[in-house]
Amino acid sequence: MLKRLVRLTFTTCMLAVLCYTNTALAHGKASLEEDTCVRQVGENLVHLNIYQPQFDRAGHYCTEVPTAGEAYLVVDLIDTALREMPVGVKVFRGKDKEGDVIIQVDAQHHPDGVINGIGRLDKGIYSIAVTAEGVPPLNFDYIVHVETIDYGKQVRTWAAPVLAFLFLSWALYKLIRSGRLKRLFGSEDE
């Protein structure tokens, strides 16, 4: 009986860890407030998508791109005010905006609210600057990891399930050591 209880607890914990919702890699159908691909300056919002149809036709990314290669950047100017001013996009190699410019879309009006750019993203870290030339200029910044692992994010994603598993394991251990299980289920051991 004790072995069954231990197996059931372990299976339940593993299912909880595997079903933990924060382990999803894509942003899916998140609202604008929760979408990690949206940046806001004042009342103005922009949304970034990076596509690599040669690897995944349905996949779209913004801050973590799983594979190096040809990339299609699409910036959506969500607010109509941004569509009435010149907006440009630059992609720099590295975290600073002082590295090589990989992709550049010169500032111009985009009445349809969509800015497109194509370029090759190799393994590494990139900075994307979306600049609206208003008064004052509006800067929307992204840091993009291509084929790299963000260990800080991994720790934040898995910390809660691991801590829950450790706590449940400790509680089960204490329950077994106290002898309460034997009194609860009888004195038979398996």
Image (tube, grey):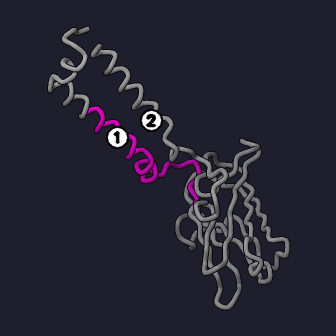
Occupied quadrant, residue 101: bottom right
Q: Quadrant of residue 184?
A: top left
For this view, does 22 lie left or right of residue 43?
A: left
Up/down of 60 relative to 96, above or below: above
Query: Which is nearer the eye, 124 or 6?
Result: 6
Name the residue that disc number 1 marks.
164
Amino acid at circle 2: Ala
What secondary structure do most residues of the magenta stretch adopt?
A: helix
For image coordinates 64% across by 63% down, the residue present is 32
Mark 2 nearby-residue class (10 Å; few <14, some 14–19, many ≥20):
some
Task: Name the residue furthest right.
Answer: 111
Q: Which mark is residue 54?
A: none
- Magenta-drawn segment: 144-170
Q: Which residue is mark 2?
A: 16
Return the residue nearer the eye: 64 or 174: 174
Chain-order first, disc 1 or disc 2: 2
Task: Give left or right: position of 72 versus 67.
Answer: right
Residue that appears at 58% across and 53% down = 64
